[in-house]
Amino acid sequence: MGDSHDGCRQLLPRAIFGINGKVENGVRQHPVTGSIIFALGNKIGIADYKKNTQEFVAGHTNTISCLDLSKSGKYMASGQINHMGFRGYVIIWDYEQRKEIARHDLHKVSVQAICFTAQDRCVVSIGGVDDGSVIVFDMEAFSPICQTPASRAISGNALTVRPLHNNPYFFVTAGDRHLRLWSILREQKKLYVQDVLMASKTRVFYCARINKTDEFAYLGTGTGDIVKIVLNCCDSEHVSKKGSTSCILGAFGTHNPRKPTGRDCNRYVNGVRALYVLEGGRLLIGAGNGDIELVEERTDVPLINFRDYPGPTWPYLRTLKKTHVSGRISSFVRSRTEMFYICTDTNEIYGLNIKTWVLKLLRTCHTKSVYCITFPKNYSGVFATSGKECIRIWSSGRKQELLRIMVYNFNCACVRFTHDGTSIVSVWNDGIIRAFTPITGRLIYAIPNAHNKGCSALAVASSGRLIVTGGIEGQVRVWKIDPYRQDLVGVLKDHSGPITSLDINYLDTEVISACTDGSCVIWDIKRMTRKQVVTANTQFMSASYFPTGVQVITCGSDGRIIYWMVYNGALIRELTASKKSSVNCLAINETGDYFITVGSDLQVKLWDYNSGAVVGIGSEHASSVISCAYSPCMTMFVTGSTDGSLIIWDVPRDFWGRPNPPDATKYSLPKTSSKTKMNEVPSRVNSGTNLKTPRGENIDGLLKATPKDDLCCVECPPCAKKEAKVPDPYAECGIVPDVRKC
């Protein structure tokens, strides 16, 4: 039943959060429609922020490494990185039809950089370290016309390529001790090249820009300075004009008037990663540490006066304005005359007005895998995600990030809301359980050393006073949470591998733990005993209770979905979700009519629980999907992938589900007077901050407390206990052991 996908509906995304900011110059804006074009995994994303729509163009077999858009906006070009021994594809796309029109695989392993020449005549691509060649693709004949090594044997690899603005047959390549000017002879299918004279200077060039008149070129270097060269072009055979050559004018830094001559030159930290040439000779510079500066060349001192300057970098630039963003700058995109989009390697897009110098965060997403997604109880307005070094709270209505809680150098394995919405509980790979307030993001309490090798799973009871955690060592631990104290109730040992997921039934009496050792165990958390164990020839990735608690559904690395009976652990049904890849996560809606699964085949599937049939398929992700969550309103769900992207999907109206059974009876726990292990727990020293949750702070007030298009970022304080000072053994008797202290 799981193999039949005929008649399935196509699931449509409501919103997509995702961008690969590590691609150099990997963000473009269409000159006509204004849409933002970017790379995400093995797909090209086209986002219209005005209409809040987004679509993907697929065709690459691996991660996209470079991207460019023609000046007319008719064509797109992209290159990819592949596994060792395989070819790296270059694909030419038609923008209007969103279709591939040509491709070639002449590069080995990877494509380092790509660009369109002027008038959309040619596409120039540079191979990576394993290739090292320059290939020119003719856009009229739609075929490659020439290929030649990019660099000489004594220089390094080319890292970037930049075309001239007015001549379609000239371009510049730059890289590691590499700076060359090229001429394309289309009829002869040849390339002429000339090395730019660098005098005695040696640099690694990361980015290049050419002014509108094709007279000068500016290059950002790894040493943090700007190299300016004069091109003196163009001649088809001699590349530069006869009797002249391309040469360097100088390596420039910013001038610091507070320091004496010889020490008044400042360089950019971690190199210059992005450049843009503005009108009037001004430059917009992005550094590797996130600094953004607007500079201009100094007019008070002639350039020839710096010949006797003691340093190799001359203080010839004057800083006009400066600001700072998080992460390394990877792209500058000019949206309007005064508006720039700035992309960083932390997968964030900022908007900068260079006239008013106002910086605004526009788009965000995770930098690495999204490990967990969760909704608050009976509230679909926000949801939380966990990833590398952070917990993020998102608005499903505004389609933006509201709150970010940072814990540097550690990953959040799982996050959950308490049912009353007063706290956010999370577990981290450093073995610490942390709870935060839902609006301000302050730390409420922290339990260090909760698991020896790090935490991997979490479940919170409906009362909020009991949490269950799973560790990488295979133990399941139950904790009692009080306002001023957190106590360990019991340790449940049965697994021999990392715990992948935990789920508590609606009565708070049982918890099921899924493990990579091929077993799922149902525990009685009142008596701290094992009730049932189910095994299969797979690595269980997720397990979830049916809303009534009578059945359990699991998924694993073998691509199968299995229904189990809770009472005796019997296998009820087995479905095949994928024959080639694993199913990484599943989530059931509130009524139990439908559930979703995500896997390494990049597909999101919506299933009918009773019939076991697939009723909807979505395929917008660009990498393996590892997390998902159903909203309490049952009209949408959220999925996350290994590239950090998030997608909010709309559930078709026919699959919203209805109460099953319509008038379910309510159950209550029987009252007992016998002592349980919960009452016999010894006190545990609290290692948190002993802060009560502020009154009135609830997750349903986060939207009102956060202004539109605003983000609150909170850094979590360290949770390590302060070491007590060792008492002085001579303090009581007053003896001075050292005579010199008398």
Image (cartoon, grey):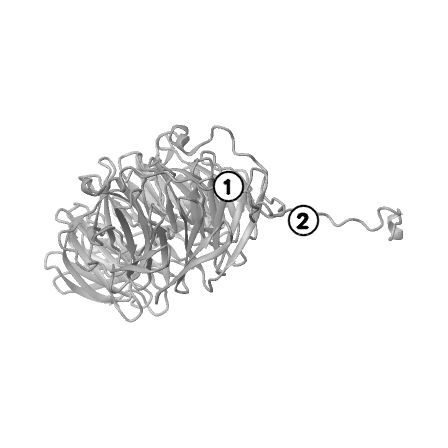
Depth check: 394 or 67 in front?
A: 394
Tell me, yes or no, whether the two marked residues, 2 and 1, touch with CB atoms within 8 Å: no
Helix, strand or loop at label 2? It is loop
Which quadrant of the structure image shows residue 247?
bottom left
Q: Position of residue 590 (x, y in %)?
A: 31, 42
Q: Which mark is residue 533?
A: none
* Image quadrant containing the N terminus: bottom left
**Residue 498 occupies which quadrant of the picture?**
bottom left
Label 2 packing within 10 angstroms: few (<14), some (14-19), many (20+): few
Vertical placement of 608 versus 704: above or below? below
Is residue 642 among the parts visible in the rendering?
Answer: yes
Q: Crowdedness of circle 1 by 10 Å Cα count: few (<14), some, many (20+)?
A: some
Expressed as whole percent of the image width and height from the top left, the position of residue 316 reads 43, 43
Eye-nearest disc, 2 or 1: 1
Q: Can I make out residue 234 in this image?
A: no
Q: Decide which of 660, 504 is in the foreground and name it.
A: 660
Q: Secondary structure at mark 1?
A: loop
Dot 1 amino acid type:
Arg
Direction bottom: furthest residue: 85
Q: How many marks?
A: 2
Residue receiving disc 2: 723
- The percent coordinates of residue 243 (x first, y second) are 26, 57
Q: Residue at x 28, y 55 (%)?
A: 66
Whole-angstrom CA distance, mark 2 to mark 1, is 29 Å
Q: Name the disc covering residue 465, or none.
A: 1
Residue at figure coordinates x 47%, y 64% from the top left = 496
Q: Residue 742, how many percent across, how many down?
A: 89, 47
Q: Nearer the viewer, residue 483 or 718?
A: 483
**Earlier-in-chain disc, 2 versus 1:** 1
The amino acid marked with disc number 2 is: Glu
